[in-house]
Image (spheres, helix red, strand yellow):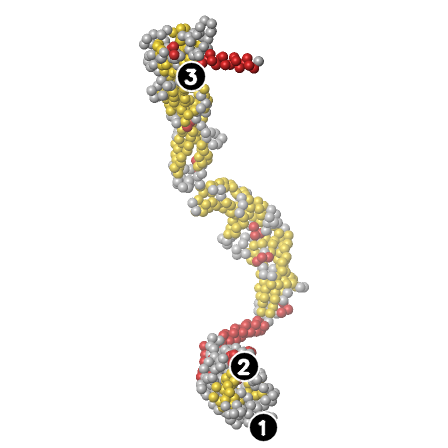
């Protein structure tokens, strides 16, 4: 079986190679949709492979012959190219469906071909186009009337075109996408088209005057498109606005104001004004003028406009006219009579702009004015005779920074009832000096007049107009000089004594009732008052004298204000007394001091006073006292003895024991001693000592004390001293032999470190400086 198939394949291949077998014809290219402008040439392509039959063409189902100059072959049909050239196309003859056909290769092959119909379109631009509104075509540049806020339907129509154009809508520069286009052939010509684009759009007031364009795009146009444009006339209701020309502040009778109303409407509108109120009346005008403006012109004004589409919005304008207050009514009219302890109400009504504030004033017979209230109503609770008088309602407002005030007619309030003692006008106690006459007074108000007035105290009682024992006179009441229906009750007490110190009661009575009140009388001895005054004066004089003394001491630098520079001068003029010598050591002049035996006990820097010597003593074995004592008195007068710390001085040595000679100064202390071989040995360390210690007295008191200015330094010691050197010779208490002499050199200086090494054998001790004087 396989061998048979192989043999058949070989035979078929051989036959093909020898042309013994012919392939079936078929289309390689078929005619396609083609558009061409009128008068131009068009080629309908049709290519057949293995063509064996003849080429044929038909249009709209009918055969088309070959005519030179109109329909002719593009190439040699027998070679398989059946393309047809249509010359100078015409929509009447050439526009339609074209079909390429090929007859069978043989009667028996039955391989005839027929292509798919292909349209040859002969282009033709629209003969007419326009924008249509309500079946009315609008000429280019015409106007279309629309209504604001309503959806409008417009059409753009294109007639007799081939193929149908593409229609687009533009509002200004903006393309509108809501249009729908339909295409259909003309009823009288099936080769041409009628195209309609319908636009549904809601136009607004802002579109007024804008261009609305329909654009027709067609390939037959040289520019590719043409358009038609109309102008929108959008109708809308009025929109009003108000402007005003006015003074900064509207004051009645002095200012003016103008209100003007403008309306934006299509079609034009009528403008009118109306004032808000119970009776609204229209005033058809654009402008309202008020010159001058009055209070009746105050209110809210509304501007409106109307046209065929309706009424506009309401635009308000306020006119606020300022005017001073005016009293409208005050009650009770004609005044009122009120009983004591009763209640009454006064009311006031006023108008003004701005709304006035109220104030109630009470006018007294003395022309004094009291402020009683700040409301429209004045309520008098628990009425007393103080409330009697004329009341005035005062209305106040402010216009342009100025106060406007108006007052009502006075309203008289009459108070009747039981008498009342005016307690606030009576002092609780009256002081008097023994032996003098005293008049006690009380103010009483009563309407009607009191029928009885009595003074009583203790067991005594006296009626008005009576004199008791020639010392107590109850005077008749007299009318009060400043108050209506008020009186003054007086009790005269002659030559008062301390026994008259008591409370005196006044009883007042009329037909409506009584009142009672007391006043205290205190009688004092006149001497006691004079003593108090004298003590006060004496204290004032003493205080003035103290101030004068302190000022004098401050200026003269006395007492605690004394200057230290003066003390230096006194100390520098010191002399020798009683065998003791104090030599100046301060400011480069310092030496030690010696006793009568030539022993130099110590060296204390600073000038010596002229009237005394320093006294240095051992705290254990007694002290040597200065006959007069001066420097200690000058330096520390409040302390009789002071301890001075001296390194190396041993407490068990007596005054005869050998001691180093020191120079006490603000610098380092230098001590010099004679050695067994007769040489001299320095003992550095000074006041600062081995442990950098200071004088014990300096630890207790500052160098600059209150004997001079706190700003001055160095009254006790000087940074530099003279080149004097003193030595002290004493007998050793244990051997009786002279001890090595210690010598202090104020000019020799050793470092602190060396001083600490050389001073280790000296033990600390304390010397006492005494300011006690010895007998001469």
- Residue under pointer 2: 757
Instruction: Kindly report which numbered mark, 3 or 2, lies closer to the viewer in this rendering.
Output: 2
Report which quarter residue 103 is drawn in: top left
Precedes in sequence: disc 3 or disc 1: 3
- Residue under pointer 1: 736
Does 371 appear above or below 292? below
> Considering depth in this image, is 429 or 78 the residue closer to the camera?
78
In 3D space, how far apart are the residues under numbered discs 2 and 1 (Cα atoms)? 30 Å
Mark 3, Cα crowd under 10 Å, few <14 / some 14-19 / many 20+, is many
Mark 1, Cα crowd under 10 Å, few <14 / some 14-19 / many 20+, is few
Does 333 appear above or below 564? above
Does 484 appear above or below 679? above
Residue at horizontal 44%, vertical 6%? 106
Residue most extreme to the left: 69
Residue at horizontal 37%, vertical 6%? 65
Precedes in sequence: disc 2 or disc 1: 1
Mark 2, Cα crowd under 10 Å, few <14 / some 14-19 / many 20+, is few
Q: Secondary structure at mark 3?
A: strand
Residue at horizontal 62%, vertical 63%? 520
Precedes in sequence: disc 3 or disc 2: 3
In the visual, does 14 lie left or right of 75? right
> Considering depth in this image, is 281 or 238 the residue closer to the camera?
238
Q: Secondary structure at mark 2?
A: helix
| Quadrant the N terminus occupies | top right
- Residue under pointer 3: 196
Q: Secondary structure at mark 1?
A: loop
In 3D space, how far apart are the residues under numbered discs 3 and 1 (Cα atoms)? 158 Å
Look at the numbered discs 3 and 1 and tell me whether their residues touch, using CB distance below 8 Å: no
In the visual, does 637 lie left or right of 101? right
């Amino acid at each position: 079986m396989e061998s048979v198939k192989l043999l058949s394949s070989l035979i078929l291949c051989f036959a093909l190679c020898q042309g013994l077998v012919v392939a079936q014809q078929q289309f390689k290219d078929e005619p396609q949709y083609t558009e061409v402008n009128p008068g131009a040439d068009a080629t309908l392509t049709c290519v057949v492979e293995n063509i064996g039959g003849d080429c044929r063409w038909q249009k709209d189902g009918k055969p088309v012959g070959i005519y030179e100059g109109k329909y002719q072959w593009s190439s040699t049909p027998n070679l398989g190219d059946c393309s047809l050239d249509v010359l100078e196309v015409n929509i009447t003859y050439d526009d339609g469906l074209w079909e390429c056909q090929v007859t069978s290769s043989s009667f028996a092959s039955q391989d005839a071909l027929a292509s798919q119909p292909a349209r040859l379109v002969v282009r033709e631009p629209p003969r007419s186009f326009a924008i249509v509104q309500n079946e009315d075509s609008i000429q280019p540049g015409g106007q279309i009337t629309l209504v604001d806020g309503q959806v409008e339907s417009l059409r753009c129509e294109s007639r007799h075109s081939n193929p149908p154009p593409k229609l687009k809508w533009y509002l200004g520069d903006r393309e509108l996408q809501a249009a729908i286009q339909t295409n259909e052939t003309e009823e009288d010509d099936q080769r041409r088209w009628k195209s309609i684009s319908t636009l549904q759009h809601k136009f607004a007031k802002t579109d007024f005057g804008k261009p609305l364009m329909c654009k027709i795009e067609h390939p037959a146009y040289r520019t590719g498109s043409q358009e038609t444009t109309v102008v929108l006339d959008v109708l809308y209701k009025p929109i009003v606005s108000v402007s005003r020309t006015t003074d900064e502040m509207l004051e009645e009778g002095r200012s003016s104001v103008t209100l003007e109303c403008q309306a934006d409407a299509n079609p034009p509108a009528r403008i009118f004004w109306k004032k808000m109120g119970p009776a609204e009346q229209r005033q058809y005008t654009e402008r309202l003028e008020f010159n001058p403006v009055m209070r009746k012109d105050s209110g809210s004004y509304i501007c409106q406009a109307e046209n065929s589409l309706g009424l506009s919005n309401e635009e308000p304008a306020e006119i606020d006219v300022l005017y001073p207050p005016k009293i409208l009514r005050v009650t009770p009219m004609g005044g009122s009579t009120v009983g004591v302890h009763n209640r009454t109400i006064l009311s006031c009504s006023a108008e003004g702009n701005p709304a006035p504030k109220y104030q109630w004033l009470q006018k007294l017979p003395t022309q004094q004015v009291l402020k009683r209230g700040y409301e429209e109503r004045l309520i008098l609770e628990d009425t007393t005779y103080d409330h009697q008088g004329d009341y005035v309602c005062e209305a106040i407002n402010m216009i342009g920074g100025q106060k406007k005030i108006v007052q009502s007619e006075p309203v008289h309030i009459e108070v009747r009832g039981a008498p009342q003692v005016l307690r606030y006008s009576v002092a609780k106690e009256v002081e008097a000096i023994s032996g003098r006459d005293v008049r006690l007074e009380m103010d009483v108000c009563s309407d009607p007049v009191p029928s009885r007035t009595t003074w009583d105290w203790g067991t005594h009682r006296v009626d008005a107009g009576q004199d008791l024992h020639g010392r107590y006179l109850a005077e008749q009441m007299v009318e009060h000089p400043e108050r209506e229906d008020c009186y003054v009750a007086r009790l005269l007490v002659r030559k008062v004594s301390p026994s008259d110190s008591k409370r005196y009661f006044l009883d007042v009575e009329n037909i409506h009732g009584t009142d009672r009140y007391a006043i205290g009388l205190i009688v004092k001895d006149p001497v006691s008052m004079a003593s108090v005054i004298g003590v006060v004066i004496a204290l004032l004089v003493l205080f003035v004298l103290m101030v004068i003394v302190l000022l004098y001491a401050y200026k003269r630098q006395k007492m605690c204000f004394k200057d230290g520079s003066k003390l230096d001068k006194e100390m520098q003029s010191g002399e020798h007394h009683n065998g003791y010598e104090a030599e100046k050591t301060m400011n480069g002049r310092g030496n030690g001091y010696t006793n009568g035996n030539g022993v130099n006990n110590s060296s204390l820097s600073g000038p010596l006073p002229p009237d005394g010597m320093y006294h240095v003593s051992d705290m254990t074995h007694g002290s040597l006292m200065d006959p007069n004592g001066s420097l200690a008195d000058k330096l520390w007068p409040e302390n009789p003895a002071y301890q001075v710390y001296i390194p190396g001085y041993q407490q068990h040595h007596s005054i005869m024991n050998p001691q180093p000679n020191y120079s006490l100064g603000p610098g380092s202390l230098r001590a010099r001693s004679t050695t067994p071989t007769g040489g001299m040995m320095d003992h550095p360390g000074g006041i600062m000592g081995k442990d950098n210690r200071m004088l014990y007295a300096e630890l207790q008191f500052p160098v600059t004390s209150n004997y001079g200015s706190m700003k001055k330094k160095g009254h006790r010691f000087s940074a530099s001293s003279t080149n004097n050197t003193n030595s002290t010779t004493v007998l050793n208490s244990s051997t009786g032999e002279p001890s090595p002499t210690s010598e202090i050199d104020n000019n020799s200086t050793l470092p602190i470190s060396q001083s600490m090494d050389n001073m280790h054998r000296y033990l600390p001790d304390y010397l006492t400086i005494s300011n006690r004087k010895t007998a001469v």
